[in-house]
Image (cartoon, rainbow, N blue to C red):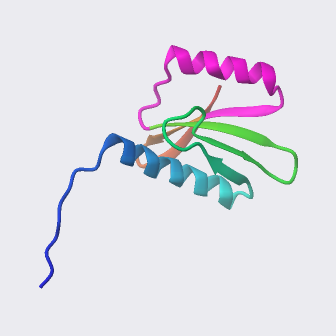
Amino acid sequence: MGRWVRYMVTNYQRGRAFEYRVKKYFEDLGYFMGRSAGSKFPDLFGFNGHGDTILVECKTNRYITKEEKMEFEILRGKLPMTKLLVAYKKNHKIMFDSI
């Protein structure tokens, strides 16, 4: 008989799992997605065959720091045609805010 091993899931693991879930969501919409390993900014980046480009920061709590807001503004200046999104969870669903 096998034994069940219980372990604690870290915040990093929880966040990474959410990033993969958001990544799959956009892949299902036809985007080619990439993920920044570790805690790099932004978490996800992608494009589709129609010239649309997106950058996504994934948050489990919807909170964006001042530093992240400043980085978004810098990216907006460098990539004016890119959609900047924040993905978060609400009632186990993926929600998005445009920045």
* Quarter residue 31 falls in: bottom right
As drawn, 36 above or below 32: above
On the rendered structure, is 9 left or right of 79? Answer: left
Q: Which residues are magenta?
A: 60-85
In the depicted view, which residue is nearer to us: 64 or 75?
Answer: 75
Number of numbered labels in the structure image: 0
Q: Quadrant of residue 57?
A: top right
Residue placed most toward the observer, 11 or 31: 11
Q: Is residue 77 above or below residue 18?
A: above
Q: Residue at x 88, y 50 (%)?
A: 50
Q: Quadrant of residue 98?
A: top right
Locate the C terminus and report the quarter of the image it occupies. top right
Residue 80 in the image: x percent, y percent? 82, 25
Which image quarter is the N terminus in?
Answer: bottom left
| Residue 82 on the magenta span | yes
Residue that appears at 85% across and 54% down:
49
Q: Residue furthest front?
A: 38
Q: Position of residue 53 (x, y in %)?
A: 78, 41
Q: Residue at x 71, y 18 (%)?
A: 74
Q: Residue 21 placed where, x, y %?
A: 52, 54
> Residue placed farthest to the bottom in the image?
1
Describe residue 68's horizontal placement relative to residue 51 as left or right: left
Membership of 26 in magenta stretch: no
Q: Is residue 72 above or below residue 47?
A: above
> Residue 45, image x and y in percent?
68, 42
